[in-house]
Amino acid sequence: MIGVLVTGGVGFVGSFLCERLLEDGHRVICVDNLQTGSLRNIGHLLYNPRFEFRPSDVELPLSGIDNIQRIYNLACPASPAHYQADPVRTMRTNVLGAINVLELAARSGARVLQASTSEVYGDPEVHPQREDYRGCVSLSGPRACYDEGKRAAETLCHDYARQYGVDIRVARIFNTYGPRMAADDGRVVSNFIVQALRGEALTVYGDGSQTRSFCFVSDLVDGLVRLMEAPCYMARPCNLGNPQERTILELAERIITMTGSASRIERRPLPQDDPTRRRPDITLATRELGWAPVVDIVEGLGRTIAYFDERLRERRALSETLANLVRPEKVGIIGDADEFAALTAIRAQPPAARATNVVRLETRV
């Protein structure tokens, strides 16, 4: 049994990764500050005695973590709406977080996988993007806190590898989607699905001809695990994403059709520094890891639409319940309906199960 630390493990991708690692028989410590992740994502994992959740921030030194052989560093808001809300903190999370993770790895001898991003390529002048392309990134634009923060984290990984012998892996993750995405995270797939299910206009920025490549979350997680466990030396970055390129307009039209929505498409100005084309070259991942995506866009979107449809129904039911309470002002909800549902589920756990985890819950009234 391998001891694994997952930073950012409560988030969309992180929670699926924790789930996969537990299924593989490992012991998992999940660290997350809950800045963007929802406790609902890991509520079902808290029953597992091999899982431990530690509410903490990677900007702080990672102390008291022992017997760890693998570290997945996924800690950082990944959607533009979230990382641009506090750009200084985004940069701190990337740089200080990487340093603290790498310091722990240097002390413990653990192998590190750094979750980097296709955003390091910026608005690319080379298409599709290969790992040896150095990118075209703005140093001062609104996306720079994330783009440059991830580039700095990659640099730190290579420096720690050269200077201290830390065994590193760097995954450059392209657009990923699936269940457990936040409804308000500003990413295109979740935006379109929620808007379509609500009967609202789908907001397409620019003329919709810009392209993205969408990878289902289970495929990405499989790629992350394969990269971490690759027997070959994998210090060089490795693209992980779906090489099937689609326009944003095509995605919007497909989601309207699949949801049966009467929504229309509304065009808005293209945001500053928004990449016009994005498609990974996954030759390295296929050759060295034997990895390629297997979930097609129809299946992936169908599962994601079903998830958001259920979530929106739950929210409507909860709103109706609260509206019917005699004294709704006495009901304390921590966060949104996601958090309320998660905390309710966790409180219902047997005491023995709760005792194996660090989470402490308090009712607020």
Image (tube, helix red, strand yellow):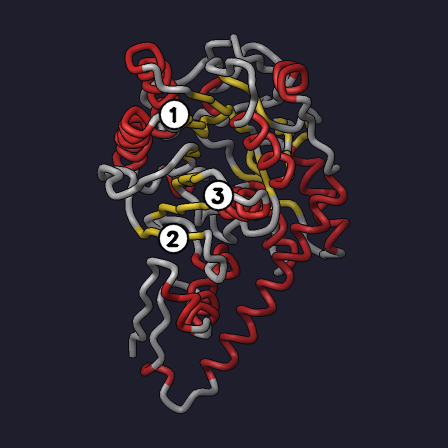
Callout 2 amino acid = Phe
Q: Residue at x 43, y 36 (%)?
A: 74
Residue 150 circle label = 1
The vertical placement of 335 against 36, above or below, is below
Residue furthest toward the front? 1
Q: Which label number is shown at residue 53?
A: 2
Task: In this rendered view, identify the residue nearer to me: 240 or 310.
Answer: 240
Residue 213, image x and y in percent?
A: 64, 29
Counting residues from the start of the chain, the first of labels 3 and 2 encountered is 3
**Which residue position is annotated with label 3?**
14
Q: What is the x, y in percent for residue 293?
A: 69, 31
Disc 3/disc 2 C-alpha distance (Å):
12 Å
Q: Please provide percent x and percent y for residue 362.
A: 30, 71
Q: Nearer the viewer, mark 3 or mark 1?
A: 3
Q: Residues within 10 Å of mark 2 (few under 14, many from 20)?
A: many
* Residue 40 appears in the rendering: no
> Residue 323 — which label?
none
Q: Nearer the viewer, residue 46 or 286?
A: 46
Name the quadrant of the C terminus. bottom left
Task: Decide if residue 347 is on the left or right side of residue 196.
Answer: left
Residue 194: horizontal and vertical position, in percent?
59, 54
Q: Amino acid at mark 1?
A: Lys
Q: Is residue 21 above or below residue 339?
A: above
Q: Between residue 146 and residue 143, name the one nearer to us.
A: 146
**Of pointers 3 and 1, the one earlier in the residue sequence:** 3
Count of picture labels = 3
Query: What is the three-letter code of the residue carrying label 3?
Result: Gly
